[in-house]
Image: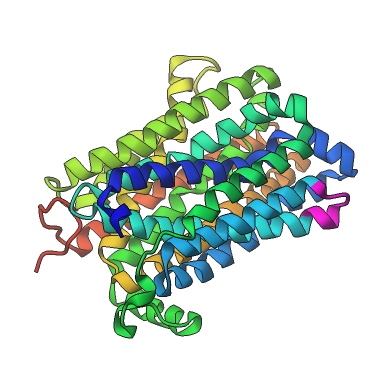
Amino acid sequence: MRWKDKPHGVLIALLMIHVVAHIDRNMLLGFSPQITHDLGLSNAQYGLLTGAVWVLSYGFMALFMGSLADRFSRTRVMAAGILIWSVCTAASGAAQSFEQMVAARFLVASGEAALVPAAVSLVIELFQARRPASAVGVFFMGIPLGIGLSFLLAGTVGATQGWRGTFYLLGVVGVAIGVPLLFLKDRRDAQGETERGAPFLRQVKIMIETLRETPTVMYTIAGFVLVHMVFAGLSFAQLWLVRERGFDAAAIARQMGGLQIVFGMLGAVVGGVLSDRVARRMKGGHAGFVVLLIALCGPLMLAYRFAPAGSALFYLGMCAGFFLPLATYGPSLALIQGLTPDKIRSTVTGFTMLLLNIFAIALGNLAVGAVSDHLSAAGSIHALTAVLLVTDVLAISAAAFFVLAARGTKLQAAPAGMIPAH
């Protein structure tokens, strides 16, 4: 257990693993032209690979893997997930058909589902008395870093190794990370039955009962999921910018990629660090801080849809959309974890990821595509503008749930900033 005496080292290691996870997850996007050509995939098949296949596997397995992390060693659950996703990433490189790629990517998602629930619980445990939201924010820097590096690797390593060779290489890297992690003992499996999570179905029942008794956590989860409607909008942002705002596709893709990495990372770090500092002094704690974030970013995001293309206000609004969702990770998850019993923390995180993937990503993307197609067929020349405005408004409306969460509990001015006052 000596490794837990170095929490900052553990956090950096978890961040690196998170980066690798998002490289593996997004490498399919970086090689999309080559993979669709070599495997003869239609747009619909490619959409299934990047959408439904991933979301259904990752979302539901996050809940199951979270329950395992609450019952057994978190490090070993993470190690098992890393080994699964790494072997299946290599298998993705060997795929010769759509069906084989579906099977490989489904299992990659299943393995990756083990990381976030276990890692967030571990980070909160290590930093609960020392700025937990900041630590969670650092961990979630892995999202923008992984996305950016996946495209960078596709353009560099992929240029010499091809997409298959790059997938093989990533599989080897993952196995090299996962095997040593198996030997780090978390001691979760040595705890008494009353201090450990229960078998899956009973664990889910306990979680539901706990959520019913803790409305602040339910409001926070609802707000956290809703603010991710920004991601549904981002999926169609490039199409909107090219079709309805007149940008060159290659140029705006480069700009968006760079800005998303920079402001996504800033959001993750700044949101976590500031929430730990401000939450102890402001009414509503972490939930109140998220309301403030939405109040600052929301108007800019709406103005972005109408501002002159290329203007300062235009880019401010674009960057606000990249900044906001990542800035909510630290304060939201710190609040959720701080009000949740230790033995169900990973399960609750997995449940949150399940809801996020189903509603904000899968159904959100489907709705944006379907409604915009309907409006275009009806003759609208601003179909995407109208629909993306709705996603912005839905994301901003998340503030209402965070207001309810802020009112539901008065938080002590403790270092964690999360403990209910009595």
Image position, residue 212 (x, y; %):
34, 77
Asked if residue 45 is positioned above or below residue 219 in the image, the reply reads: above
Name the image quarter holding the C terminus.
bottom left
Q: Is residue 277 visible?
A: yes
Foreground of the two, 277 or 108: 108
Q: Which residue is found at the position 53% from the left and 23% from the top? A: 258
Asked if residue 411 is positioned above or below residue 272 in the image, the reply reads: below
Residue 201 lies left or right of residue 417; in this view the side is: right
As drawn, the residue found furthest toward the top would be: 311
Number of numbered labels in the structure image: 0
Name the image quarter holding the N terminus.
bottom left
- By what rule are the colours in the image chosen? rainbow
Image position, residue 23 (x, y; %):
59, 40
Image position, residue 53 (x, y; %):
70, 58
Q: Is residue 291 visible?
A: no
Q: Give the quadrant of residue 185.
A: bottom left
Q: Which residue is found at the position 58% from the left and 67% from the top? A: 60
Foreground of the two, 239 or 7: 7
Q: Give the quadrant of residue 11.
A: top left
Asked if residue 370 is positioned above or below residue 295 in the image, the reply reads: below
**Dominant secondary structure (helix, strand or loop) of the stretch shown in magenta:** helix
Foreground of the two, 321 or 350: 350
The magenta stretch is 94-101
Q: Which residue is found at the position 66% from the left and 37% from the top? A: 383
Image position, residue 90 (x, y; %):
72, 48
Residue 126 lies left or right of residue 31; in this view the side is: left
Residue 322 lies left or right of residue 241; in this view the side is: left
Q: Give the quadrant of residue 349.
A: bottom left
Q: Which residue is found at the position 49% from the left and 45% from the top? A: 18
Foreground of the two, 111 or 325: 111
**Is-magenta flag for residue 306?**
no
